[in-house]
Image: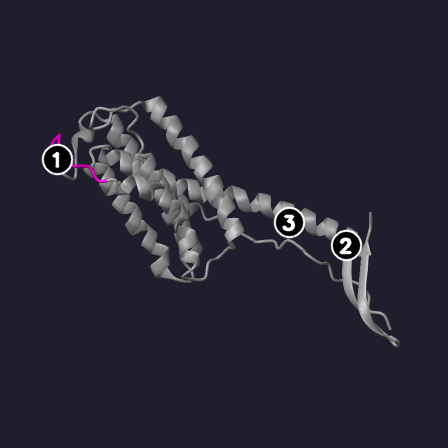
Amino acid sequence: MEVAPDTVAYRMPVVEYKFNPKSLILPASLITVGAVGTAIDGMNDFHLFSRKESVKKIHIDDYMEWGMLAWPFVCDLMGKEKHNWVDQLCLVVLAEGLNAGMTRTLKYTVNETRPDGAPYSFPSGHTANAFLGAHMAYKEFKDSNPWLAYSGYALATLVAGSRLYNNRHWVSDVLAGAGFGILSVELSYLIYFPVRNAVARRINTRGAKNLVISPVVSEQGGGLYFSYSF
């Protein structure tokens, strides 16, 4: 007796993702507060630290800016992530592209002067990258490990604080930067999964037509049925 071949090999799984519009409230609020603080004269004079011109700078922000992009993968080693590392890598790359596009466009358009006199202050790119990695970890671990989910925010806040301490950014810059980092992650999930799943369904449909692998059982013994249509 032969078993009808109905098993398709090497299918690409479809990963459903439901977008929640409420997830945009936090980044939109941070960006709005930062933009208002930059637009109103005098608001940028507010600092969290009293500093002299000869302040000795720390460089942890320069390292952590890019290091935070790897934070979701570090968390993968310590907990159960929601999506596999391939999807995470695609999400990080897409989010970083969106983030760089938004922040750099604003930097050169607004051309806000930094506290130390250099140009292109608003928004903080270091802070945006740091919160991008932090929010990605939150999205991946919020349902399985709250400690890992929120850990990145503490590290990202350290980056934001160091930008203020180093006299490189105003408070409004880092607030907006945090908002753009979070927003870029939310947009990457919104864009990536519909495209990824459309590709997966197409691959699965073509695979179902072209490639079939199934076990075969007969009176003479068993085997493997293989069929490929060109």
Q: Is residue 28 visible?
A: no
Please tell me which of labels 2 and 3 falls first in the chain. 3
> Would you identify the image quadrant in which residue 51 lies?
top left
Residue 158 percent location from the top left of the image? 26, 46
- Which mark lies nearer to you, 3 or 1? 1
Residue lying at 53% horizontally and 44% vertically, measured from the top left: 192
Looking at the image, residue 165 sits to the left or right of residue 15; the answer is left
The residues colored magenta run 51-58
Q: Which residue is mark 2?
A: 211
Is residue 106 shown in magenta?
no
Q: Quadrant of residue 212?
A: bottom right
Per the image, label 3 sits on a secondary structure element best described as helix
**What amino acid is found at the position of numbered circle 1 in the picture?**
Arg
Q: CA distance from mark 3 to mark 1?
A: 55 Å
Q: Which residue is labeled 3 in the image?
A: 200
Amino acid at circle 2: Leu
Residue on which disc 1 sits: 51
Please name the residue shown 69% across and 47% down the image. 202
Looking at the image, residue 91 lies above or below residue 51: below
Q: Residue at x 53, y 49 (%)?
A: 87
